[in-house]
Each structure stands twice: as structure tokens, then as C-alpha cells.
Image (spheres, helix red, strand yellow):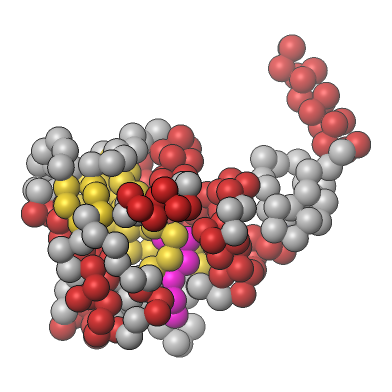
Amino acid sequence: MRYGILRYLYAAVDFLFPPQCLLCGEFIFSYNDGYLCGNCLDAVCAGDGPLCVTCGMWFESPEGAHHRCGTCTTNPPHFDCARAAGAYEGLLRTAIHDFKYRHKTALAKPLAQVLAERGAHMLPVKSYDVIIPVPLHPQRLRDRGYNQALMLAERLAGQWDVPVWRELLRRNRRTQPQTVLVKKERRKNVRGAFSYCGRPLDGKRILLVDDVLTSGSTVNECARVLKLNKAKQVDVITLARVR
Ligand SMILES: [Zn+2]
Ligand SMILES: [Zn+2]
């Protein structure tokens, strides 16, 4: 009964002071717990068109079934499956850029909301034993003050009731941002950049979290290290991926 009254009270507060979309500032009148308006949600999320079952790359043609892309067939990655909420362009690109480089950490909430919704749609989120964020180098962490991947991972963990392991996967050396490198250089750039120093991973199913997947070299190198430490499965979720 009490909760019934509270519900009406919250609804009245929402009506008088409607929450605003954290991306575009529009008022949100629908009764939900969202932080984004419907337009922004539609704009940042990829559709359900055919994609590579392994790396998650979208195929040009909107017709046909999911299948493995040529790259993953000839050169299978160390991770089992990677999925992204949307393409690294437009509104999503701007939001990630603001979140990462302009200290707009309030964006962690709406971006994690997008990630949680799309993630639950594409991956067996309840089956993971642990969530691990892609780490930053300690120097970069000090410069930025936060690890955006960890902020996302913590929110996913809260929603899905899966523990986050932080600081066990480490970045040993500073690497150049993958976005400024050509494809060939990316793999070399991250080779040997990560180490795992924690509890044994025997048989663990792991979900790696990052903000952007460029060529996949970074998460691939993380997955290689986790599998060397006996992880059974490593899936990857990112907010965005480069088309
Ligand atoms: Zn909006
Ligand atoms: Zn692929």
C-alpha cells in the first residue's frame, strides 16, 4: 500500500519536473527509469541486421542470416564473441568522446543504460562468472582520473548481478590510441601490453567491457592473456564499434 502511494508521488514529481534526456536535453514524459529519450536511444543503437557471429561486425546487406566474416574465419580471434551497442559515429561517437575526453562522467549512466539493454539482447548476460573492464595504463588513469570502461562495467555488474574484477588485468605499458594507427600497427601496438595477476580463471566465463572496438586488437590481446590463464570463455561488449 505504502509503495502504491509512493509510486503516485514519483509519477506526480515526474509530471511536474520531467527528467531530461542526458544526451539532447529533451524532456522525457514516458514513465520509466530511462535517462535517454526515445529518439536518442534509436539513434545510438544498431539494428538487428546480420552480423559476424564472432566479431560482431555488421554486414552491408540488411538481408540474410548471421554468419562468420572472412577475417574471423581465416584468423580467428582469441575472444569467443564480441558485440557492440551501436556504430562509432554520430551521436554515440560524440557522447563517448565527451564521456572519455571531456570529463562528462554523468554520461556513464545513460551510456551504461544503452549497453545494458543492448547487451542483454545480444549476449547471455546472466551466464558470466565475472566482468572485467579493459584497464588503462596507471599513468593515463592518473591523467584522466577515471577508467571509463570500469564505470560502465560497474553499472552492468549492478544490473546483471555479476561481480566485477578490477585491477587484476593490468596494462603494463602505455600504448598509442588505436584510432590513430593503421590496421597492421594496431596488433603490434598492444602485443604484450597486458598481464593478468589474480585468482585462477579455471573454467571462468568472462565478459570484457570496453568503450570502443576499433580493430578488435585491444580486446583480442586481453582475451589472449585471460585464456592463457585458463579462462574458458571470453566475450566482449563495447558501446560502439568502428564499421
Ligand atoms: Zn535525447
Ligand atoms: Zn568477424
Q: Position of residue 175 (x, y in %)?
A: 29, 67
Residue visible at 58% across and 53% down? 103
Q: Residue, x 29% and y 62% (percent of image)?
A: 174
Residue 132 on image: x %, y %: 31, 46
Please give the range of residues in magenta. Answer: 238-243
Residue 137, percent from left and from top: 32, 54
Q: Based on the displayed image, in which of its 4 quarters is residue 164 positioned?
A: top left
222 to the left or right of 34: left
Tell me which residue sits at (17%, 68%) in the image.
191
Q: Is residue 104 above or below residue 189?
A: above
Q: Closest to the observer: 56 or 243?
A: 243
**58 in relation to 175, above or below:** below
At horizontal 48% and vertical 41% (from top left) the residue drawn is: 155
Judge by depth and name the residue closer to the eye, 66 or 163: 163
Q: Which of 87/38 is in front? A: 87
Whether the magenta-drawn stretch holds residue 37 is answered as no
Quick one: 123 or 92, which is closer to the camera?
Answer: 92
Residue 208 appears in the rendering? yes
